[in-house]
Image (cartoon, helix red, strand yellow):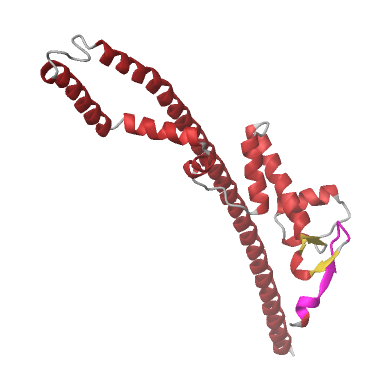
Amino acid sequence: MSSHNHKTGVCAITGKSLPLHQLVPLGAMRPQIAHELQVRHPDLTPDSLVSTSVLNDARLDHVRALLESQLGELTHLDESVLKSLHQHELLSQHPADTETARATFGQRMADGIATFGGSWAFILTFGGFLLLWISVNVFVLAARPFDPYPFILLNLILSCIAAFQAPVIMMSQNRQEARDRLRAENDYKVNLKAELEIRHLHEKMDFLLHQHSAKLLEIQQIQLDLMREVAGRRENRGTA
């Protein structure tokens, strides 16, 4: 292991001794973050080293203040986005998989019954059952049918099926609404985090471009000074 990995520094805010790769100079931070840290700690200078944990906390506070200025009071969804942004977690997930994993046996059975009840398989199967019932009572057992016309027993069975089928379908619809709500919340969190990440990248690019332009201007100024010195030496030699 190289000696560079053993070098340490002291965080100007916490006073803790940390490896250099966990410390960031104040001048290398984005101006907004550096300004907020200097407001809290006026003794900081551009060369002061700050730990990455303190820097992440300052970024989190900056993003929270930015959201509060635009959205007002933050909801639990906004707080979860800030938490994932701070801890570098993924937000994207499949709400249906999460909901299915937490579903009880009765809920899964209700989903299955509702799915079957809204399919052509149920229509054809139940239509065949009705035709068979009517045919048996009208033609096969015409002398002594167990449910003669107007098929009172069949009407009773149909009423019982409808009475049980309606709440089962409502249970499945409620679960579908819950899944849609989870999906909408997940989309909102992902979109909000993507917007914050893009804004963070824009600010970082602007800061890097500003630093790069400043260095280029400094190099050009040095080149102009050197050219003036060379020109001055030639003039002195010419007069001599």
Q: Confirm whether residue 188 shows in the render.
A: yes
Q: Is residue 15 above or below residue 20?
A: above
Classify 70 as above or below 198: above
Q: Quadrant of residue 213?
A: bottom right
What is the quadrant of residue 159 in the picture? top left
Image coords of residue 121 (percent x, y): 25, 34
Nearer to us in this view, 102 or 8: 102
How many marks the image carries: the answer is: 0
Side of 236 relative to 127 (left or right): right
From the viewer's side, name the closer residue of 143 and 211: 143
Q: Look at 48% across and 33% down and name the residue there.
A: 107
Say which residue appears at 23% left-offset and 30% top-offset.
125
Toward which corner of the image does residue 207 lie, by quadrant?
Answer: bottom right
Which stretch did the figure color magenta?
4-15
Please state if 134 lies on the left or on the right of 177 as rendered.
left
Q: Residue at x 78, y 82 (%)?
A: 3
- Which image quarter is the N terminus in? bottom right
What residue do we see at 12% from left, 21% from top? 140
Asked if the magenta segment contains residue 8, the reply would be: yes
